[in-house]
Image (spheres, rainbow, N blue to C red):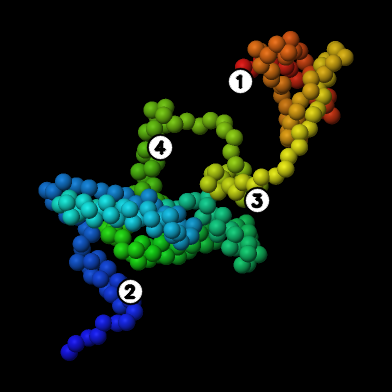
Amino acid sequence: MRKELAKNYNPAEFEDRIYGDWCEKGYFKPDADDKKPSFSIVIPPPNVTGQLHMGHALDETLQDILVRTKRMQGYSTLWVPGTDHAGIATQIKVEERLRVDEGLSRYDLGREKFLERVWAWKDSYEARITGQLKKLGASCDWSRQRFTMDEGCSRAVREVFVNLYNKGLIYRGHRIINWCPRCLTALSDAEVEYKDQPGFFWHIKYPIKGEDAYVEIATTRPETMFGDTAVAVNPEDEAMKHLIGKTLILPAVGREIPVIADER
């Protein structure tokens, strides 16, 4: 009996069936005992903060091209899938949903209940991301799927960081960070939304102690003056070098601060 060709292209009729057949027959699983040369890629794990976007689709497609090419060239090929916890970003997303949907904060729930919400979020979006990758036809070995907070992954990260620390290659130091006054935590640059605003230069006169003169400071952030501990001038600046070693009076506070040299 002849089956007529459908008038319209309908991927739902065959894509899931064919992909499921590939996975069931283990076409994406390399043989550990295979003597062939090996080729492996670890997927840059998408954050479980949301679903995949066009950038992910492009990136995963390019990786899939590499992986499938290597298979056809005779390599024992492994593409490891996984997702990333993205701790702070995920926390922000969960808190946002709590605030919008229920009018609650993480403090209202308490630590244990809030962690339950975070894990529920992870399970939901991890499943969505995995489903999207499978819809793309990504030839990953799903038996090796990982999450960055899996015990094996966490242990490996701790070991690497401890080794790097012991070798003096990483260290703790004082750095300027992005601090969120609402979340009360540090944020990466990736989580910060920048916005240009019209500014204004404030000119403030710092009297020189014992002299009828002053040093004029120009700043866009006059509120920081209360934390001033010194005023720096360039020792190569002929107009300013005579001030080095003198003492200034911090306006509105009356605290004495020194003038120091700093060639930077």
Nearest to the eye among marks 2 and 1: give it: 2
Residue at the limit of the structure toward the left, as seen here: 35
Quarter that holds the C terminus: top right
Mark 4 burial class by Cα count in 10 Å: few <14, some 14-19, many 20+: some
Residue 191 seen in render: yes
- SS type, badge 2: helix
Nearest to the eye among marks 1 and 4: give it: 1
Q: Position of residue 152 (x, y in %)?
A: 34, 49
For label 2, the residue is 11
- Which amino acid type corresponds to the residue marked 1 in the rendered image? Arg
Circle nearer the N terminus (2, 1): 2
Residue 264: give its label.
1
Q: Position of residue 254 (x, y in %)?
A: 83, 24
Nearest to the eye among marks 3 and 2: give it: 2
Q: Residue at x 39, y 64 (%)?
A: 132
- C-alpha span from label 3 to label 2: 46 Å
Circle nearer the N terminus (3, 4): 4
Mark 1 near mark 3, Cβ–Cβ under 8 Å? no
For label 3, the residue is 182
Quarter that holds the N terminus: bottom left
- C-alpha span from label 2 to label 1: 63 Å
Residue 147 seen in render: no
Circle nearer the N terminus (1, 3): 3
- SS type, badge 3: loop
Residue nearest the observer in this picture, 183 or 133: 133
Residue nearest the observer in this picture, 13 or 179: 13
Residue at the limit of the structure toward the front, as seen here: 7
- Which amino acid type corresponds to the residue marked 3 in the rendered image? Arg
Residue 161: give its label.
4
- C-alpha span from label 1 to label 4: 33 Å
Q: Position of residue 120 (x, y in %)?
A: 48, 63
